[in-house]
Amino acid sequence: MKRQLHLNLFIHSRGHHEASWRHPASSPLPLTDIRYYQDLARRAEAAHFDSIFLADQLALGDDVSRAARTWLEPVTVLAALAVSTSRIGLIATASTTYSEPFNLARQFGSLDHISDGRVGWNIVTSWLASAAANFGAAGQVSHADRYARGEEFMAVVKALWDSWAPDAVVDDRGGGVYASAERIRRIDHKGDCYQVAGPLNLPRCPQGRPVLVQAGSSDTGRRFAARHAEAVFTAHMEKATAQAFYADLKALVAAEGRAPDEVLILPGVSPMIASTEAEAGRLAREVNELSDPEVGRKRLSGRFGGHDFSQLPLDRPLAPQDFPAPASVEAARSRTEVILNLVRREQPTLRQLLATLAGARGHFTVAGTPEQIADLIEDWFTDGAADGFNIMPPLLPAMLDVFSAEVIPLLQRRGLFRTSYAGKTLREHYGLPWPKSVFEEVAQSRRVVRLTR
Ligand SMILES: Cc1cc2nc3c(=O)[nH]c(=O)nc-3n(C[C@H](O)[C@H](O)[C@H](O)COP(=O)(O)O)c2cc1C
C-alpha cells in the first residue's frame, strides 16, 4: 500500500488564530463547556483523523482581559472524550517538570483503559516562567535541568507501565485468585530527582503504554525525542526548515538504534480555506483585523522569557538585535529561532510580525483553495518534510469542517489518506509497533538460555 498520511486535529481555543474567539464563524459555546470538545472530537472522528490533541500550560496568560485564555484541564477532558468517541486517538499534554511520575503514569494508564487503547501523552518540560511560580519554585528551572529531570521521569513512568505483565490479572472467581503476584513487580527506582518503589496500582494498559508524543525542537529536545517519542509535533514557517528538521530527527532516531519510521514527524499547518484564493485571503485578513497588537506584544514577551518589547515601535523594520539571543532564553528555545529566522529573512515591522504570529503562533499558515492545501500537504509529505500534519484550523469548527469536506476527499482520491479506520488503537492508526512487556523479554531470554545450554 502507498505510504499513508497521518492527520492530527490540534484543538485550541475557538481556533488557532489569536482573534478566532471573536469571529462569528467560531463556536458560540463557552470554552469550559465539554460539549464543545465532544463535538469537535466527533467531527474529527467522522473525517477519520488519526487523533485529536490538547495543549496545556500551567499558568494563566497575562492577556486574559483581551484574549480567550481559558480551557479545561486536558487529562480530565480526555476522560470525557474517551467515552464520547470510539475510534479516534486522544492526546493530552502533561508536564514532566510539575507532575510526579507515579501520578502521571496512573492517569494516562487509566485513560488508556477507559478509551480502550487510544491515548497519547504529549511530553512537555513546561517553558513558561509564570508556571514555575505556581509550583513553589523560586525561579524557572533551567532548560538543561528541565530536560535532565524529564529524562529520569521517562525512566520511571516506563518502568511503572511495565510493572504488570499483560496476563497478571487472572480474575478467577472460582479459584479465588485475582492476580498473579509473580507477574507484578516493584520498580525500586532511586535517582537524583525521584525515588519510586512501584509497582503501579493499575494493570498494564491496552497499548502497553500510551503513545509518547513530544514537541521540543531545540538540540536537547530533539535528542530527547529521538530516545522517547513515537510522534513529534513541530512548528515551521517554511518547507526548507521542516525538511532539515525531518532529516536531522530521523538521523538522531537511527543513531539511538530505533527504526526511523517508528517516529512520526507532524509539522503544524493552519489553513484558511475557501473556493478561491482571493476569498481565502480575504477571510484571513478579516480575522487578522480582529487581532490586538498589545496581546501579540505580551505573547512575544512570554516566548522570549519575559523580555520587554513595550518600547519597540510598531512600524519600524525589525532586526535580530531587537531580540535577546536564543541561547539566553530559558523558555521554548526552538520557537524563538523560528521567529528570528523570519526577522532575518523578511525584516518585518513589529506590527507585521505580530500579525504573522497571530495566525498560529509561529506555525505554517496558508490561505488557499482545497486543491492548493491538498497540493501543499502532498508536497511536504512526499518531499521529506512530514509524515503527516498537525492540523490547526484558524477558526473552529468552521475551518475544520471545510478541511474535512473539501481537502480530505482530495487526499483520499490521491490514495494518501484512509477512507475508514483499519485499527482500533492510536498505535494502529499511527502504524507504530507494540511495546514489548519486560516480562516477555525476560521469558524470551530465559528460553534462549535454556536452548543454548
Ligand atoms: C505543536 C506544539 C505543541 C506544543 N504544546 C505545548 C504545550 O501544550 N505545553 C507546553 O508547555 N509546551 C508545548 N510546546 C512546546 C514544546 O513541547 C517544548 O516544551 C518547548 O518547545 C521547549 O522545548 P525546546 O526548547 O526543546 O523547543 C508545544 C510545541 C509544539 C510545536
Image: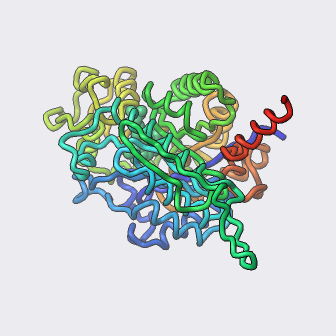
Whether 341 is drawn above or below 16: the answer is: above
Whether 148 is drawn above or below 69: the answer is: above
Instruction: Residue at 55% x, 48% y: name it.
Output: 391
Between residues 207 and 174, which one lies in front from this camera angle? 174
Instruction: Residue at 39% x, 67% y: name it.
Output: 31
Ligand 1 in which quarter:
top left
Q: Position of residue 130 (x, y in %)?
A: 24, 47
**Residue 185 visible within the image:** yes
Between residues 202 and 419, which one lies in front from this camera angle? 202
Residue farthest front in this picture: 453
Please identify the quadrant where the N terminus is shown. Answer: top right
Display coloring: rainbow
Instruction: Residue at 25% x, 57% y: name it.
Output: 64
Q: Position of residue 446 (x, y in %)?
A: 76, 38
Whether 400 is drawn above or below 146: the answer is: below
Between residues 447 and 400, which one lies in front from this camera angle? 447
Q: Quadrant of residue 331?
A: top left
274 sits to left or right of 237 = right
Between residues 240 and 139, which one lies in front from this camera angle? 139
381 sits to left or right of 91 = right
Q: Position of residue 21 (x, y in %)?
A: 37, 61
**Residue 49 visible within the image:** no
Q: Position of residue 388 (x, y in %)?
A: 63, 41
Please identify the quadrant where the C terminus is shown. Answer: top right
Instruction: Residue at 79% x, 33% y: name it.
Output: 449
Q: Number of labelled discs?
A: 0
Residue farthest left in this picture: 311
